[in-house]
Amino acid sequence: MYKMNAMHTQPPKVSFKEQMHQAREEAILRSACGLLGEKPFDAMTMDDVANAVGIAKASLYKHFCSKEELCSAAMTQVLGHVQTYLAGLPAELPPLDKLRALLRWSLERLLTNEIPLLPSRNSTLRAVLMTNQDYLKGLVAVSDQIGQWITEAQAQGVVNPTLPPRVVLYTLYARACDPMVSFLKESGQYSDADIVDLVVRTCFDGLAAR
């Protein structure tokens, strides 16, 4: 009886066709993020995405009916990746170290276009995202978790307690998409690891000589 019940509880097998559909959709979302890292939302087209994936535009529209829907799904997925990363940080890690780790992780993905440079460069997309409930829900969850670590770090005296937590949060968001990353990358003088280290150091340690 147990074996029969166990068999009945197994998840249904995904057909090969569905596996291919899911794999193609994942490739579409990755390509959209990569393109948003290279150009503004207004300049990106569905043709660009289809060409990047290597599929016909008609096939692309079988997954997403518009550029707005596609990019909203891509950015919601990005937030999901952020949430997964936050949840995977060791609970015993001090809050300041969690904030450092998050910024480092974000910068590493910015350098590989896994996380696009959004704020001012893609203001039109930002307006689209602000109407997407799934995106907003993910954004609130991420912000609440980071905000908790900020207030804990301030209570421990390792982050300036006179700064409003929201200011610290927005500072971290700004550093996570800092155009300085692109400037340093284009200079050819620094490795990706060097760039990440420099941005993290200037964010948390400031510019003052010690």
Image (cartoon, rainbow, N blue to C red):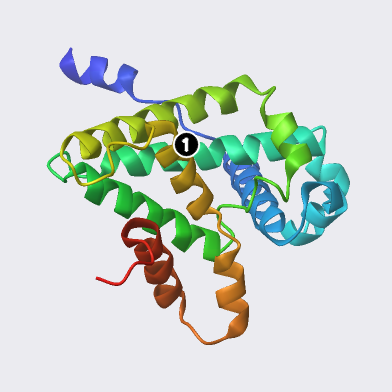
Residue at position x 36%, y 50% in the image: 102
Q: Is residue 8 above or below residue 166?
A: above
**Residue 159: percent from left, percent from top:** 26, 45
Q: Nearer the viewer, residue 13 or 189?
A: 189
The answer to whether residue 111 shows anywhere in this view is yes
**Residue 36: percent from left, percent from top:** 70, 53
Residue at position x 53%, y 42% in the image: 78
**Residue 88: percent from left, percent from top:** 27, 42
Furthest residue in direction bottom, as rendered? 189
Residue 52 in which image quadrant: bottom right
Q: Report the side of 156 relative to 173 (left or right).
A: left
Q: Nearer the viewer, residue 202 or 193?
A: 202
Q: Report the side of 72 relative to 108 (left or right).
A: right
Residue at position x 63%, y 41% in the image: 74
The answer to whether residue 56 shows anywhere in this view is no
Amino acid type assigned to the residue bearing label 1 in the image: Gly
Residue at position x 52%, y 87% in the image: 189
**Disc 1 element:** helix
Instruction: Give the quarter of the figure containing the N terminus.
Output: top left
Determine which residue is flagged by label 1: 80
